[in-house]
Image (cartoon, rainbow, N blue to C red):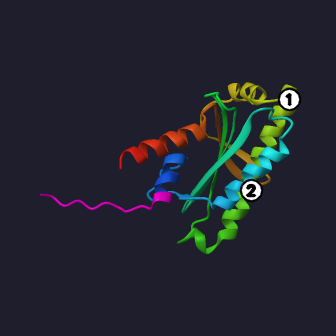
């Protein structure tokens, strides 16, 4: 009988990997962004766009790898499968352990949040509509591939689609729980 070894990953790492598919190939599992950060950014988007979002609401997911940070901000409406998800990714500097310099992660996340907020703001302004429909029009104009964007002298990679990231996360969790 052959003995195989497996890399043990934590529940949070597994969950982060299921939730956030990296832009770049990764050899290590993802780590979730802190829950307080996710909660604060979710609150920020829901408050900032309270009038424009109509009956829809924002949800935020994020993860980081040793050399990449990812954030997904989804606008969704209860009872509707289609949503609008804006994914953003930035390269992190090569360090033995990014947790030794958390300010670098924080700085990159600030640029990402600013870019995502600007995109949603532009969607609502240009369409003249409120609600998720305003954003769907903009999503239809974009391709479903990672594209590099220069933002305040930083390179941020973005991908926009109509995935309901929150629904996919919940489905992954249910499937994972069913395996036990």
Front in this rendered view, residue 42 or 102: 42
Q: Is residue 81 magenta?
A: no
Secondary-structure class at tag 1? helix
Q: Would residue 21 be visible to someone looking at this image?
A: no
Residue 29 falls left or right of residue 155:
left
Highlighted magenta segment, given as a residue range: 1-12
Residue at image position (70%, 57%) is 109
Q: Are marks 1 and 2 in contact (CB under 8 Å)?
A: no
Distance of mark 1 from mark 2, alpha carbons? 27 Å
Residue 6 falls left or right of residue 99:
left
Q: Is residue 29 above or below residue 179?
A: below
* Residue under pointer 1: 126
Secondary-structure class at tag 2? helix
Residue 153 horizontal/vertical position (percent): 77, 54
Mark 1 / mark 2, whichever is N-terminal: 2
Q: Is residue 30 above or below residue 135?
A: below
Determine which of the numbered discs, if any, sits on residue 112 in the image: none
Front in this rendered view, residue 15 or 176: 176
* Residue under pointer 2: 40
Residue at image position (68%, 55%) is 38
């Amino acid at each position: 009988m052959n003995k195989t070894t497996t890399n043990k990953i934590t529940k949070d790492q597994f969950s982060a990997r299921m939730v956030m598919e990296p832009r770049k190939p990764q050899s290590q599992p993802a780590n979730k962004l802190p829950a307080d950060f996710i909660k604060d950014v979710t609150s920020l988007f829901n408050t900032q766009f309270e009038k424009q979002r109509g009956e829809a609401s924002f949800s935020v997911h994020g993860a980081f790898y040793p050399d990449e940070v990812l954030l997904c901000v989804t606008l969704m409406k209860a009872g509707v499968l289609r949503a609008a998800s804006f994914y953003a990714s930035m390269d992190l500097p090569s360090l033995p352990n990014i947790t030794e310099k958390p300010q670098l992660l924080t700085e990159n996340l600030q640029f990402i949040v600013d870019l995502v907020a600007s995109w949603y703001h532009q969607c609502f302004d240009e369409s003249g509509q409120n609600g998720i429909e305003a954003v769907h029009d903009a999503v239809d104009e974009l391709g479903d591939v990672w594209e590099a964007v220069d933002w305040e002298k930083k390179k941020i990679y973005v991908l926009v689609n109509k995935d309901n990231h929150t629904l996919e996360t919940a489905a992954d969790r249910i499937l994972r729980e069913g395996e036990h």
